[in-house]
Amino acid sequence: MQPTSFAGAQRPTFVSVQVSEARRYYLDLAPPPGRKLSVVCGGCERIRPDYRVERQTFPFFAIEFVAEGEGILELAGRQYRLKPGMAFAYGPGIPHIIRSDGTGRPMLKYYVDFTGTDAKAILEQSPLGAWEAVQVSSPKEVIELLEMIQREGGSESSYGALICALLVPVVILKITERAVPCGTGELRSLATYQRVKQWIESHYKTINSIGQVAGACGVEPAYLSRLFQRFGHTTPYRFLMRLKMNRAAELLLDGGLMVKEVASELDFADAFHFSRAFKRIYGIPPERFLKSSRG
């Protein structure tokens, strides 16, 4: 990434130059009044060791999300140690300081600045609207949405600005869904959940039971269920089955495998048990899925 300048005009004064690399987009630095939601600008930037942004207010509402590294945030009178997967917001009248922590792990963070008659209300419906930093349980999901805004914001499409405006509430909703209090105990539990989730994603083809997962990860089955309910809003079994069935659909459609072959590939006892599991997830048996897809 290379620092990006605002073509045809001077760089906005609120955009920091204390970065080593950046990808930025500018959509509408003077949005018309009365519009429900407009994205002003945004980007992804790697901060320098001397990075420090100190403001008593800000002309727009902003969401920031830490993807890598660490830093320090002072927001509305409270201080936070920023780490990967943490999000926060600020806006008009909200004092904030964002700075490097001097550890040699400079942050890579995303930001989206937006405004509009609905902007404040959308934020207030989420933990971000309390002007507190939150940790999210699935950073990758938030980053994927922010990267989508990044692509649309940097495109030449006449629909880019509208798509970005529609995606901002989705980002806020995803952060709300995956928000975790920043307490030490919660963060330890979150780390365990993420470790187990990653293990399931790597081994799902050969996993036969949640007891197998619990044993491999050194976690009690009951605690494992609580972790997935708390951070994933699902059960570990349903998460496992969703991975297996997503793969099953690929093998049936793109791989050209028969139902019994897919059952064997995903380590089911037989085609009957596989078909029952497939129907529980998708609502129809695999044979009907194949027929409707090819039809």
Image (spheres, rainbow, N blue to C red):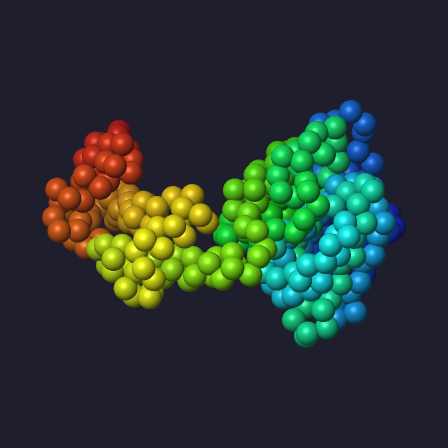
Hey, which quadrant is residue 47 in on the image? bottom right
- Does residue 168 appear in this view? yes
Instruction: Residue 27 in the image: state x and y as whole percent.
Output: 74, 41
Q: Residue at x 73, y 54 (%)?
A: 78
Query: From the viewer's perspective, is 130 left or right of 203?
Result: right
Q: Nearer the viewer, residue 134 or 272?
A: 134
Instruction: Residue 274 in the image: state x and y as whole percent.
Output: 18, 44
Hey, which quadrant is residue 252 in on the image? top left
Answer above or below: position of 120 versus 190.
above
Q: Residue at x 50, y 52 (%)?
A: 138
Q: Nearer the viewer, residue 253 or 193?
A: 193
Instruction: Residue 177 in the image: state x and y as whole percent.
Output: 52, 42
Q: Quadrant of the C terminus?
A: top left
Furthest residue to the top?
A: 34
Hey, which quadrant is residue 101 in on the image? bottom right
Q: Nearer the viewer, residue 188 or 236?
A: 188
Q: Quadrant of the N terminus?
A: bottom right
Instruction: Residue 43 in the image: state x and y as whole percent.
Output: 69, 51
Answer above or below: position of 291 versus 218.
above
Q: Residue at x 69, y 64 (%)?
A: 71
Answer above or below: position of 170 versus 84.
above
Q: Nearer the viewer, residue 168 or 265?
A: 168
Query: From the viewer's perspective, is 258 left or right of 64?
Result: left
Q: Residue at x 72, y 34 (%)?
A: 120
